[in-house]
Amino acid sequence: MSAAFPPRRAFKGRGSASRPAHRFAVDEREAFDDGWGTPDPAEEATSPPATEVRWEDARSAIAYNDSPDIGFDRSLNPYRGCEHGCSYCYARPSHSYLGLSPGLDFETVIIAKRGLAERLRHELSRPGYTPATLAIGTVTDAYQPVERELRLTRAALEVLHAARHPWALVTKGSGVERDLDLIAPMGQAAQAAVYVTITTLDAELARRLEPRAPAPWRRLRTIRTLAEAGVPVGVSVAPQIPFINDDMEQVLTAAREAGATRAFYTVLRLPWELGPLFREWLDLHYPERAARVMARIHDLRGGKDYDSAFVRRMTGEGPWADLLRQRFAKACTKLGYEREARALDVSAFRPPGAPGQLTLF
């Protein structure tokens, strides 16, 4: 006899519906219907989980990598966890290293890095430091809602602005417009670039996929604002999810009209705990097509939820991956997107020095 479990339900404004145990947990608990009656939905109603910010002292600011399929070797992330709550976020399993669930904990327990700007200033001032483009927000969004009050991203940009250090940022957050006083001069000097992620133009789908991120039209306005300020701006149409967001060409067209000059995409990635979490999301929001979506993902991933091999993890493999690649390339050629991102200028970099240190002239 198969076990019966109480049905999950979506929380308004949250991408996950549960807190599954992380992969390092010793014990795992699951709700079970013992048959003694069905709870009254009115009694079960609870408010959406609130966001909690926890502080940790930043031990370092810049993280380095040598991955051959990533176009940068260093990155900076002011936060762990992301309140945008994207159901597909490949960074969700990173919360497991903190002893937290990749589900609701990832989007409700946000770790803010105290002293990040000071650590960044120190690392840029080290003897022998060689500047190269610093990627910001590669794991979690640097302009998620808590940035409005905490301003950790702004503090880091102030250090980079003073040092004239090149950086590139990927975000869904319209809060990036707040920092145009720092971003615009660097963008005009070819020292900064911003990519805005727009997964779909369908507002209802976006609300389900990315419940606390700005609406698609708002992100298009952010692209326009950045472009009009002279900032090199691009669009990310990642991730592509089979039978879910199928309007890639429309997104690329709208972004190009708003001022984006470059674009990139990746295929949905489901590492570690993200596989079961995404299945849960499909069952809640698109149960009639859940099996079809997962079957196509397996076609892209060699029969598995995920293939971690370099390059393939970004684009998938097989005929469906080839079709996506062709669609993207043809749309970019037709719309006049640049084929390669322009290199940012590193020649103006000047070490910032220690806090309070006076310059000679």
Image: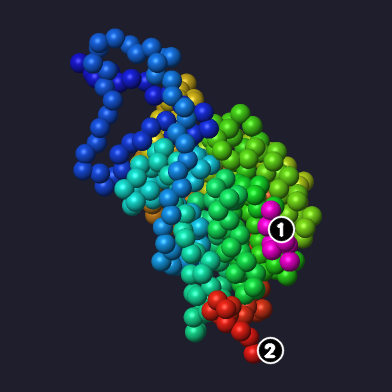
Name, please, the residue furthest toward the right: 228
Residue 136 lies in the magenta stretch: no
Q: Nearer the viewer, residue 211 or 3?
A: 211
Q: Is residue 164 visible?
A: yes
Q: Nearer the viewer, residue 311 or 197?
A: 197
State the SS at label 1.
helix
Residue located 62% across and 75% down the image: 163
Q: Quadrant of residue 287?
A: top left
Provide residue 274's location: percent of width, then percent of height: 39, 41
Image position of 96 with respect to 192: above or below: above
Q: Amino acid at mark 2?
A: Phe
- Quarter of the image with the C terminus in it: bottom right
Image position of 284 with respect to 146: above or below: above
Provide residue 340's location: percent of width, then percent of height: 64, 61
Q: CA distance from mark 2 to mark 1?
A: 28 Å
Q: Quadrant of residue 20?
A: top left
Q: Earlier in the sequence, mark 2 or mark 1?
A: 1
Provide residue 356's location: percent of width, then percent of height: 57, 78
Name, please, the residue furthest toward the bottom: 360
Residue 183 lies in the magenta stretch: yes
Provide residue 327's location: percent of width, then percent of height: 62, 43
State the SS at label 2.
loop
Q: Are marks 2 and 1 in contact (CB under 8 Å)?
A: no
Q: Is residue 327 visible?
A: no
Which residue bears the numbered disc 2?
361
Q: Amino acid at mark 1?
A: Leu
* Residue 331 appears left or right of 212: right
Residue located 66% across and 61% down the image: 193
Q: Is label 2 or label 1 in front?
A: 2
Which residue bears the numbered disc 1?
180
Residue located 71% across and 44% down the image: 220
**Magenta part of the chain:** 178-185
